[in-house]
Each structure stands twice: as C-alpha cells, then as structure tokens.
Amino acid sequence: MRATPARARRWLTAAGAVLTLTAVAACGGGNGGSSASGSADKADLTWQFWIGGTADQAAWQKVADQAHTDHSGITVKLQGTDWNNYWSKIGTLLASGKAPCIIGMQSLRLASYANAMLPLDDLMKKYGLKTEDFDKPIMDGLKSDGKQVAIPYDSGPMVIFYNKDLFKAAGVPDPKPGWTMDEFEAAAKKLTTGGRTGLVTSPGDLGVTSWVRTLTGAEPLADGKLNLTDQKFVDGFTTYANFVRTDKIAPQVPSGNGDFETTQFTSGKSAMQLNGPWSLIDTLGKVKFNLGIAPIPAGPDGSKTFTAGSGFGISRSCKTPDAAFQAIMSMTSEGPLTTLASAGRAYPARTAAHPAWFTAAKIPEAKEVIEYASQNSVPLVTSKNWVQVNDLLTRFGTQALNGEIPPDQALKTIQDQAGAGS
C-alpha cells in the first residue's frame, strides 16, 4: 500500500516545520495572541486545539472560559482545526515563532514539538500546581528531557473492550484483572464462530506497542532510538500479527479505513477490541449490547500496557507565560475536567475528577480495571519522527497482519526508513 499524495504532502509539511523548531526555540518572537506583555493577571490569550465540529468548539470554549472565571483579567479564545490537519498547522505556527500562547499537545507527538515549547517546571512551583493531583503516567508522558512541557487534561491506559453478550452466549467467563494470554487466546478462538471473530485489531502505534509490551516486555525505543528490529520486539509483533494471519481470531485489515476497527466491534462482528478509556463512553452510545472492559491479558511478566493522553502547553513565543500558565491551571482544574468526564469527552487526568467519569461510564468493573491497568502502565515514549513511524507502521503493519509480508520484514523496512530520524 502506498501513501496517498495528499497524506504524504501533509506529513512532509509537518516534518519540514518540525525540522526548524530547534532553531526557532531560541529565538522567541511573536505576540502569542496576547495584548498585555509581561502581565501575570491580565492577558488576551489564544489557544490552538483540535476541534471536531460546532458542538466540540462550544464544549471546549467552556473549558477556556474557566480561566476568565478564575482570573477576571484573563481571556482565552479558542482557535481550532480538525485532528488530521492540526499537526501540520501547529508545526508551521511553532516554527514561525508566531504561535498562540496555549498549545494543545498529545503525548505521542510531544517529542516532535517540545523544543518550541516552554518548560513549565518553574511556573508549576511558582503557582503551586501539585503533580500528585494528576495521574503519574500521563504527567511523565508529557515530559521532554525530564522537564514538564504540558499539563494533562486526559489520560488512559489501553484496555480491552468486550461484548458481554457474546461472551455469555459462548460460555466464556468475563475476563478479570490478572487473566492470562492463554485465557485470552482460548476465549478468542471460542468466540470466533458464525462469521464473527474473537478480536479486531489494526496496526496503530498504541495497539501494536501495547500488545508487544505485554507479550514480551519490549518497547519501541532504546536510548531514544527506534528499536523495532530488537528480537524481543520482533517476537512480540509476530505473535500479534499471527492473531490475523495464522490464528484467524481477528479479521484481515482493510487499507485506508481508519474506522474499521471501531465499526467491526460496535456492530457486534468482533467480540474484543483494544482501546483507551477516552473512547468508552462514546462506544457505549454506539453499541446495542452489554459492554465490558478488562485489562490487556498478562504475558510472562504480567499485564503490561501503555498510557497516552493530551494536555496544554505554552509556546516559547508567548509574551505572557505567567498568564498562560494560570489559564492552563484553570482549564485543567477539577471543575472543567469533571464536566468533560461527565460528558464523556475525556477520561480525566486529574484524579479528583475520576468519579464523574466512572459514574458516566455505568460499567461496574470500570474503576477496578482502569486503576489496575494504570498501575501496570507506563507512558509510550516516542521519537521526534513518530508521525512518520506511525504512518509506516500502519502501511507495512497492515501487510504483515494480512500475511502479505513477514512480520520481521515489515519491522525492518520501518526501521530502515525511519530509524535514522528517531
């Protein structure tokens, strides 16, 4: 499968912007959307974020408005674009030295943009932000070179979503924390019947790396460099690919269909899917069966998974970083995150807002499972060219899962094409 020209152009635009970020980082410049240079208590700030539509815009603007509620002299105006275009746009803005003050940032992409963003540790001490009030894995996931670059609003370890009705009909017990890979494979084989499969999967970065980590303990980076041809990673990826290509417990993966995995699960055609808690409440609204969640099954060293999430940081070009940080503290405070959790828009990174999400989820085992998975989770640390890595993983990983090329060949191709830039 070849990348479409449009997709390639988007990645090249983002990559080209990222290459200049290091140089811009030292330069500052730009007004950051602020009209009161140097003021800690008065500023008109702009916040750049990914937005899914009119309703999304309104919901997130309410988060921004919390800053004005807490600080009458501070206003935050939200500017948004869709997810697919956000990363090339924010790369260009950061590289230009004219980025807005407040920047939405995802943990998996942080490495590509961190040089153009302001370390927040001094501001955290100055204004008393307590790191212990947030989930540790995502606080660590939003660090670069040991420095905090963004404050998280959401988080979540990868977990298994499963169809309780199909499990019951097949006589398969509901999975519990501590269930093993052998138990998972036995369940998946029994559930693969009547045109349905036990599992649906695809070669996305979080899915692949989480399965590999629990299967063999391997991680995609070693000493900051891409490490996909390490034998433990190859072994884990081969077992994962075999779910589709030889074991037939998961369907083949169509190319160019980003919604396939979710559609396959929510329609009842597959009994299990690896997903993040940020998708749970949305999934509940789509399914017509009883939905359950379980930790990723345990490999030789136990259940191991990765955490990802997003948050808000400050561009180096911002002239009012104190005001921007106070705004971010308001935007990630208990009130807004509780509202987001209740509406199903995020599994909150702040622990005090967790109960609202568990109430909205309406799944009895959710608290036990998420807390167990979090305890067995670490942030997925990525390379500066992770956008390219994920693109290649999607392309060649699909071929490996579908049996078109050997899994080790797929990983070697990705390593050869992206490894030098990691």
Image (tube, rainbow, N blue to C red):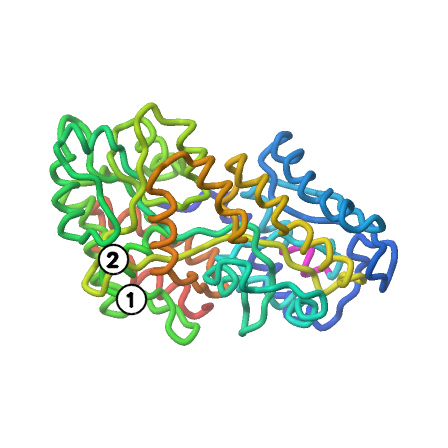
Q: Earlier in the sequence, mark 1 or mark 2?
A: 1
Which quadrant of the figure contains the N terminus?
Answer: top left
Name the residue nearer the viewer: 184 or 208.
184
Instruction: Specify whether 122 is left or right of 87.
Output: right
Dot label at residue 218: 1
Amino acid identity at mark 2: Phe
Q: How crowded is mark 2: few (under 14 residues within 10 Å), some or many (20 or more)?
A: many
Tell me how far mark 1 sits from mark 2, CA to CA: 10 Å
Amino acid bearing label 1: Ala
Q: Does the magenta stretch include residue 93?
A: yes
Question: Along the line of sight, which residue is nearer the eye, 18 or 283?
Answer: 283
* Location of the C terminus (image quadrant): bottom left
Asked if 13 appears above or below 253 in the picture, the reply is: below
Which residue is rendered at x = 66% and y = 67% of the image? 124
Measured as percent of width and height from the top left, residue 327 is found at: 72, 53
> At 76% from the left edge and 49% from the top edge, which residue is drawn?
70
Taking the spot 12% from the left edge, 33% from the top edge, the residue there is 171
The answer to which image quadrant residue 105 occupies is bottom right
* Front disc: 1 or 2: 1
Residue 393 at x, y percent in the picture: 36, 53
**Image x and y of residue 176, in percent:** 24, 47
Q: Is mark 2 on a helix, strand or loop?
A: helix
What range of the chain is rendered magenta? 91-96
Label drawn at residue 176: none
Q: In this view, does 82 lie to the left or right of 237?
A: right
Q: Is residue 408 visible?
A: no
Quarter residue 117 falls in? bottom right
x, y percent for residue 75: 80, 47
Residue at the limit of the structure toward the bottom, as seen here: 223
Disc 2 designates what residue? 237
